[in-house]
């Protein structure tokens, strides 16, 4: 299995995985399926920074992960949120861990200090996965989402990627 930057030609496979998660799980509160063009645009936006990755084995895309700004505003410029999705058959076999290790390294290289996971409470496997990677639950927001006739909590987890690094000055330069 290899972890590599996503390419435009991966958009169809990535879209199929994302839409399975949207349509058939409570892992995301989104109920609008993505188009291949939307996914291709997301991949293109992240291609330069290494912020959009896929796990591939024998020519098959097993999963994808990417990071993106957590919130607008300069005060959040060192914080990113991430998404990771795997095919059911790829779960529990190390693909997710490897995707996250490469994604975290790319995020740190892009000067991301904190990486955020926003996890559905209906997805205890994702909570355990992130905890095993060193993410700490920092907030649980009750009934923040609604999908398939259920109120769902959002669990925020975070990992400090660059512990001990002093905050940069107002110009963004290290102190």
Image (cartoon, rainbow, N blue to C red):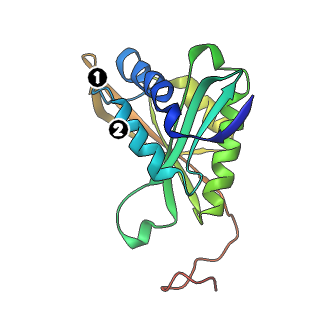
Q: Residue at x 46, y 67 (%)?
A: 77
The residue beneath circle 1 is: 147
Q: Position of residue 171 (x, y in %)?
A: 49, 86
Q: Position of residue 109 (x, y in %)?
A: 65, 62
Depth check, mark 2 against mark 1: the one in front is 2
- Left or right: 108 as drawn, with respect to 15: right
Asked if 10 appears above or below 100 in the picture, the reply is above
Residue 97, quarter of picture = top right
Q: Position of residue 44 (x, y in %)?
A: 46, 48
Residue 136, quarter of picture = top right
Badge 2 or badge 1: first in the primary sequence: 2
Q: Residue at x 42, y 55 (%)?
A: 70
Asked if 173 appears above or below 38 in the picture, the reply is below
Mark 2 surroundings: few (<14), some (14-19) or many (≥20) residues within 10 A: few
The residue beneath circle 2 is: 38
Extreme front residue here?
9
Helix, strand or loop under label 2: helix
* Nearer-the-camera pick, 67 or 29: 67
Q: Position of residue 14 (x, y in %)?
A: 49, 29
Quadrant containing the C terminus in the rendered view: bottom right
- Left or right: 97 as drawn, with respect to 45: right
Asked if 107 appears above or below 16 in the picture, the reply is below
């Amino acid at each position: 299995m290899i972890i590599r930057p996503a390419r435009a030609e991966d958009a169809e496979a990535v879209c199929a995985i994302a839409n399975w998660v949207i349509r058939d799980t409570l892992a995301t509160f989104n109920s609008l399926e993505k188009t291949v063009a939307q996914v291709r645009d997301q991949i293109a936006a992240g291609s330069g920074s290494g912020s959009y990755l896929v796990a591939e084995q024998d020519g098959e895309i097993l999963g994808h992960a990417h990071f993106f700004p957590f919130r607008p505003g300069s005060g959040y410029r060192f914080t990113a949120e991430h998404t990771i999705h795997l095919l059911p058959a790829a779960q529990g076999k190390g693909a997710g861990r490897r995707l996250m290790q490469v994604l975290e390294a790319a995020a740190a290289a892009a000067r991301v200090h904190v990486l955020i996971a926003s996890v559905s409470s209906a997805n205890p496997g994702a909570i355990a996965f992130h905890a095993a990677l060193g993410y700490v639950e920092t907030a649980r927001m009750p009934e923040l989402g609604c999908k398939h006739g259920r109120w769902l909590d959002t669990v925020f987890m975070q990992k400090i990627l660059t512990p001990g690094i002093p905050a940069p000055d107002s110009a963004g330069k290290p102190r």
